[in-house]
Amino acid sequence: MSNSLHSSAFVTPRLVLKKVLAKSQHEGDGAVVRRGIGRTELKNLDPFLMLDHFSVSPPAGFPDHPHRGFETVTYMLEGGITHQDFAGHKGTIRAGDVQWMTAGRGIIHSEMPAEANNKGLQLWINLASRDKMIEPNYQELPSENIPTAEKDGVEVRVIAGESMGVQSPVYTRTPTMFLVFSMMPGSEWHQSIPESWNCFVYVIEGEGVFGCTSSSPCVAHHVLVLSLGDGLSVWNNSSKPLRFVVVAGQPLNEPVAQYGPFVMNTQSEIEKTLEDYQYGRNGFEMRKYWRSQ
């Protein structure tokens, strides 16, 4: 199709295939999350397993709990979360900071509120079968170390991948793009995305037009699943700022077997994981001795 017919910045523009409202639900110990991925309407989007927009205030939180077989990415929007795990790792991430945690063969940790009001996004990214039992790892990026760029009323924070010629230092074992955009009223942006990767948008605040100029505006707390293509166009035709994330990843095309915080490829691997956790082996050796402080 020629450009004159769809006036696009891309050969194959990505369009909105599906729109899902991230409805509030209770999670952890008294916390509230808006779950956009990992719900009935959108079970997963390979390689992404879950997206939560969380809000937590003391004494609520996410006390000691395990993970195996995937990565979690936490991006703080307000306040802070204090994290500690059974390997002795402890720290607090605050507004604008990122923690990229590879659970691998096993981690037990707690995530508890550091201030009165704490909000952020947590994304779960699946690991390929060959990577599920690797050693746990952390990449922590304070806000000031996250590459940013700005052009014509559009600002981007590059948590993973590349935008506006700037690149993130984060290593993504499952190839991933994670961009946080702020767009002023009247601005537009055209973001290249690897053509075969699955991609979604989550609108944090404001209202935007995604995909093509004729699409209806999308408002806060919606996940937009995009069609395949080489890029996404966004317009802020409203009178208020627009803030959203663009997340894309290379599909693993592997079977997913999930039981709560454990994500493997087969049911027998899940059963093995439950045994490992129960008896404290194969990565969960510290389970019997460790409690967060």
Image: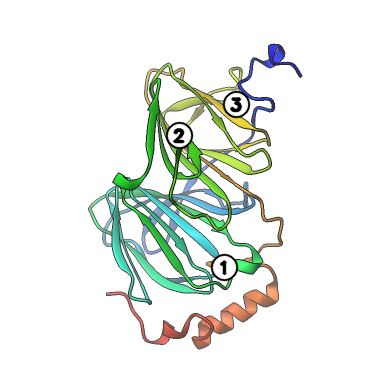
- Measured Cα–Cα span from mark 3 to mark 1: 33 Å
| Residue 118 to residue 154: above or below | below
Question: Is residue 64 at all visible to an observer of this figure?
Answer: no
Q: Earlier in the sequence, mark 2 or mark 1?
A: 1
Q: Dot 3: few (<14), some (14–19), or many (≥20) neighbours within 10 Å?
A: many
Residue type highlighted by circle 3: Gly
**For the residue marked with disc 1, what is the amino acid?**
Gly
Q: Earlier in the sequence, mark 3 or mark 2?
A: 3
Viewer-proximal residue among 220 and 212: 212
**Left or right for 282, reference 147:** right
Helix, strand or loop under label 1: loop
Where residue 54 appears, as percent x and y from the top left, is 40, 51
Location of mark 2 (residue): 220
Q: Relative to 138, say whether 24 is above or below.
A: above
Q: Is residue 230 visible?
A: yes
Q: Which residue is mark 3?
A: 211
Could you tell whether 105 is left or right of 137 in the image? right
Q: Residue at x 36, y 60 (%)?
A: 30
Contact? badges 3 and 1 (CB < 8 Å): no
Badge 1 crowding class, 10 Å Cα cut-off, few under 14, some 14 to 19, many 20 or more, is many
Looking at the rendered structure, the secondary structure element under dot 2 is loop
Nearer the observer, disc 3 or disc 2? 3
Numbered tag placed on residue 69 in the rendering = 1
Q: CA distance from mark 2 to mark 1?
A: 31 Å
User: Residue visible at 69% across and 77% down?
Assistant: 268
- Count of numbered tags: 3
